[in-house]
Amino acid sequence: MRRTVKRKKSHEFRLRKKDKKAEKPSLLRSFANTFMIVFSAIILGYGLIQFCGQTVYMTGPSMESELYDGDVLLVNKLVYKFGRVKRNDIVAIKRIGENNYYDIKRVIALPGDSISVVAGRLVINGKQVSEDLPYSYINSPGVLEDTVKLGDEEYFCIGDNTSNSEDSRYVNFGNVQKSEIKGKIIYRILPKERRGKLGR
């Protein structure tokens, strides 16, 4: 009986020693799993911002009375990878050399369109645009004093507040290339009292 008891104690001791050794790899695996989860979340978040959507800020009064200075907006960056830019879309434009700044404007003319201002009225492809549109009357035509014909993948973008907007009417802004349109403004996040979907 004494021998049997000794064997049991020795056996239990060996088991305990093995359990302690097994704890170390378990902690390493747990740390590795946590690291992979955090790393994957960072990569996924970066991918969503880079390719799907992100928030931008409206700066200045150029899009009043649709958007206001300080509005926080959501850009859908995926929509134009599978679809076309449409007339009246509000878009986020990143000009060449502007790494952190987006211009927020409305697309009013598409590739191949002819556009001009005649007696203060905007004319696209020979027809005056509807008086219901915020940009139908333009006091400062800029380059639109003459007819502008848009080339392939060129868009004419202006601010709804045409009296206070630097946009495609001016040479230093010019026509917008398709590659410069980074997404469509689809939602106003802030301020809360004006939160909601955007677009016509």
Image: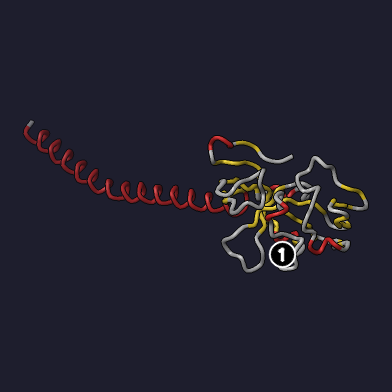
Residue at 67% from the left image edge and 49% from the top image edge? 63
Residue at 54% from the left image edge and 40% from the top image edge? 191
In this picture, is 153 found above or below 3?
A: below
Q: Is residue 15 left or right of residue 167?
A: left
How many circles with numbers are drawn on the protein?
1
Quadrant containing the N terminus is top left
Mark 1 = which residue? Answer: 173
Q: Is residue 199 left or right of residue 26?
A: right
Q: Nearer the viewer, residue 170 or 178?
A: 170
Residue at 78% from the left image edge and 55% from the top image edge? 139
In this picture, is 3 found above or below 72?
A: above
Q: Amino acid at mark 1?
A: Phe
Q: Judging from the image, what secondary structure is the residue with disc 1 in? A: loop
Residue at 58% from the left image edge and 37% from the top image edge? 195
- Residue 173 in percent (x, y) is at 71, 64
- Toward the left, the furthest residue is 2
- Residue 130 in percent (x, y) is at 84, 42
* Residue 199 visible within the image: yes
Q: Is residue 66 left or right of residue 129?
A: left
Quadrant containing the C terminus is top right
